[in-house]
Structures are given as structure tokens and as C-alpha cells.
Amino acid sequence: MQYDEIYQLEVSMWESAKNRNPEAFLNLVSKDAVMVCGGYRCSGREYAEIVAVFDCKTYAIEHFEIVNHEAESIQVHYVLHMEVNHEENRDLSGTFHITTTWKHIDDSWKVVFNMDQRVNG
């Protein structure tokens, strides 16, 4: 797996969330993945339900880096800037550190772990 390929998988995951497409999301995320977002832990399957009503107007990925690269798994870290469409979802807007672990499963790459942490409150 090359840098550009894993970056594009991460973008595809965000695009599926932005487009509120849980099916596309689950093509990239294991149903049993551990998702820790905003201090809340859920499975990939449960997070796909959130994706169906997700509010993302824009996002930008910066400082993308591969922090661990094995033959069957890759862990990445980056900074995400996100804006929402609706004021009631403003807690989703902001800047976040994101880490994702991808694992090669049944001839495709799937997210098995994802975690975010808001930058500066």
C-alpha cells in the first residue's frame, strides 16, 4: 500500500460520511471496527447509522502521515478541519487530530480502529 492509496481510502471514508452514505462507509469500515469519536465508543456498524444523518459541509485533511506500516496493517494520523451545515451540530465543527488503523481483510483494506481528539477545546 502506497501513501497516495491510503490517503485516498481515508478521503473516500470522509466522502461517504459527508454524502451520508452508510453503505459506502461500510465498504471501507469493518462492522466490528472500534470507533472512538468525541469520547464516545461504538462499532463501525453503529457509526454507519450516524453517517446516515451526519452533518458535514466541508472538510480538509492536513499533515497526513503514516505512523506505522506493516504488510497487513497501516496506521495513519492527520489533522482534520471540518465545518457543518447546521448550527445545532456545531460540536462537530472544528479541528481534530485523527488516527485510523487500516487492516487488509479478505482482499480489501478496512478500518478497524478510528479515534479523534479535538484540538484546543
Image: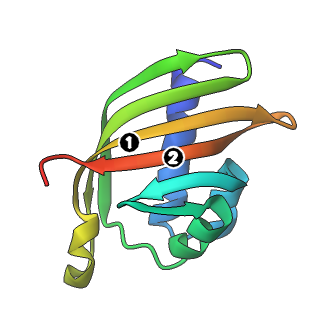
Residue 97, image x and y in percent? 31, 41
70 relative position to 66: left or right: right
Identified at 42% across, 58% down, the residue is 37
Q: Residues within 10 Å of mark 2 (few under 14, many from 20)?
A: many
Quadrant containing the N terminus in the rendered view: top right
Q: Residues within 10 Å of mark 1 (few under 14, many from 20)?
A: some
Residue type, label 2: Asn
> What residue is pinned by disc 1?
98
Is residue 91 depicted above or below 96 in this figure? below
Q: Is residue 24 visible to the viewer in this orientation of the structure?
A: no
Identified at 53% across, 70% down, the residue is 51
Figure quadrant of residue 55: bottom left
Numbered tag placed on residue 76 in the rendering: none
Residue extending farthest to the bottom is 88
First in residue order: circle 1 vs circle 2: 1
Residue type, label 1: Ile
Q: CA distance from mark 1 to mark 2?
A: 7 Å
> What residue is pinned by disc 2?
114
Secondary structure of the residue carrying tag 1 is strand
Quadrant containing the C terminus in the rendered view: bottom left
Residue 46, image x and y in percent? 62, 70
Is residue 105 depicted above or below 16 in this figure? above
Residues at discs 1 and 2 in contact (Cβ within 8 Å): yes
71 relative position to 75: left or right: right
Identified at 48% across, 79% down, the residue is 53
